[in-house]
Image: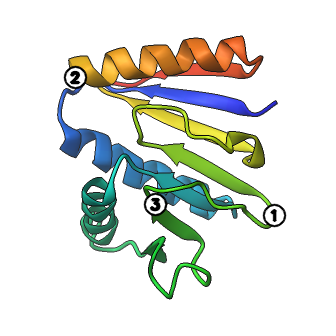
Amino acid sequence: MARIDFYILPDTTLEARLAFACKLAETIHRKGYRLHLHCEDRTLAEQADQALWSFRPDAYLPHALEDSELAESVPITLGWQTLPTPDGECALLNLHPEIPDGIERFSRIAEIINQHQEVLLAKRACWQRYKALGHEVVPHKLG
């Protein structure tokens, strides 16, 4: 069973959620994991893509959208469709409101919760589903 880390932010905005996703992506990348950011739709994936380019002027995280020809050659992908089948150690950062099919292929999974009511409701349901599936769920209250 995968370990699921829930990062609970005090903020309510999408921008705060994406900013933390960038910091977490940087940490995961530094530890040598491949990473897939799973988004609700292409719009959110493009917003996350832009955030990864601009979150820190002195940072570079090699990444690509899942439908880019670069997706096979970079350690960080952003997608909104079916989860990829990773080769080797790969972490999943789930920005989608639901748990996607295929999570069992990932060794680590992270969820980011902010205080927006829709996100809270969706991620509360995810938490309960992960527990029901027998995963270890670890909360990290930030701020």
Q: Are marks 3 and 2 in contact (CB under 8 Å)?
A: no
Counting the numbered discs, the total is: 3
- Work out how far the residue at label 3 is from the one at label 2, CA to CA, in angstroms: 22 Å
How packed is label 1: few (under 14 Cα within 10 Å), some, or many (20 or more)? few
Q: Please give left or right for residue 96 compared with residue 115 in the image.
A: right
Q: Dot 1 lies on which element? A: loop
Residue 116 marker: 2
Q: Can residue 41 be seen in this view?
A: yes
Q: Position of residue 44 (x, y in %)?
A: 28, 53
The residue under the point 38% across, 21% down is 122
Amino acid type at mark 2: His
Lower sequence index among marks 3 and 1 = 3
Q: Where is residue 14 in the image (x, y as percent from the top left)?
A: 21, 40
Q: Position of residue 8 (x, y in %)?
A: 40, 23
Q: Where is residue 2 in the image (x, y as percent from the top left)?
A: 76, 34
Q: Is residue 115 visible?
A: no
Amino acid type at mark 1: Gly
Determine which residue is flagged by label 1.
88
- Work out how far the residue at label 3 is from the one at label 1, CA to CA, in angstroms: 18 Å
Q: Which part of the image, by quadrant, shows the C terminus? A: top left
Determine which residue is flagged by label 3.
79
